[in-house]
Amino acid sequence: MHRHSRFALACAVAAAVVCSAPAARAEAGVTVHLSANRVTKLVGREVLIPAETARPGETLEYRAVYRNEGPREARSFLATLPIPHGTSYLPGTASPGRVEASLDGRTFALVPLTRVVKGADGRDVVREVPVAEYRALRWSLGSLGIHQARAVTARVRIQTSEVATLTH
């Protein structure tokens, strides 16, 4: 990344995780702690290093820890992680594993996403949507009890040096 790398990455991390349960956030006092870590190999093993900068081709792991500090249980709690432009979700890295994805940040379905396309013979064919087109991931965390915390994670690969343009 270039001259705006620290600002851009901070903006990407801040924009990367959104709590999708207004009742839980407003009434139950759910807070979220966001982080981005660069995934590297050190002495033959994988290590996560806090990411202040990132370069094209590098892998980042986004992690959001949701904590219920409110007076009651948060129910039907959803956690949404936008996949910023200039990055591509790495399939199989979402945790918890049962995850939904979206191409527009509004409509979600279980991964892998599929679409109907016209085949060479003119017939409709169901094909998997390339993960590079995923724009958001979402988890249903169910209930989040008082003082309980839950984390969601997913990895992305930086595709371009235009991280400063990442918005969601």
Image (cartoon, helix red, strand yellow):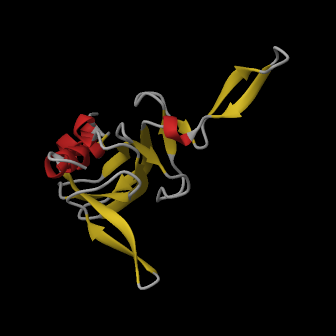
Of residue 50 and residue 54, the one placed in the foreground of this image is: 54
- Horizontal and vertical percent position of residue 82: 36, 40
Tell whether 88 sits left or right of 125.
left
- Horizontal and vertical percent position of residue 27: 19, 43
- Horizontal and vertical percent position of residue 47: 37, 75
Given the current orientation, which residue lies at the most extreme top position?
A: 122
Which residue occupies 81% across, 19% down?
120
Which residue occupies 46% across, 59% down?
95
Residue 127: which quarter of the image?
Answer: top right
Residue 148: which quarter of the image?
Answer: bottom left
Q: Quadrant of the C terminus?
A: top left
Given the current orientation, which residue lies at the most extreme front position?
A: 2
Which residue occupies 45% across, 81% down?
45
Of residue 62 and residue 151, the one placed in the foreground of this image is: 62
Which residue occupies 32% across, 39% down?
20
Please, is residue 67 above or below residue 49 in the view? Answer: above
Tell whether 162 sits left or right of 138.
left
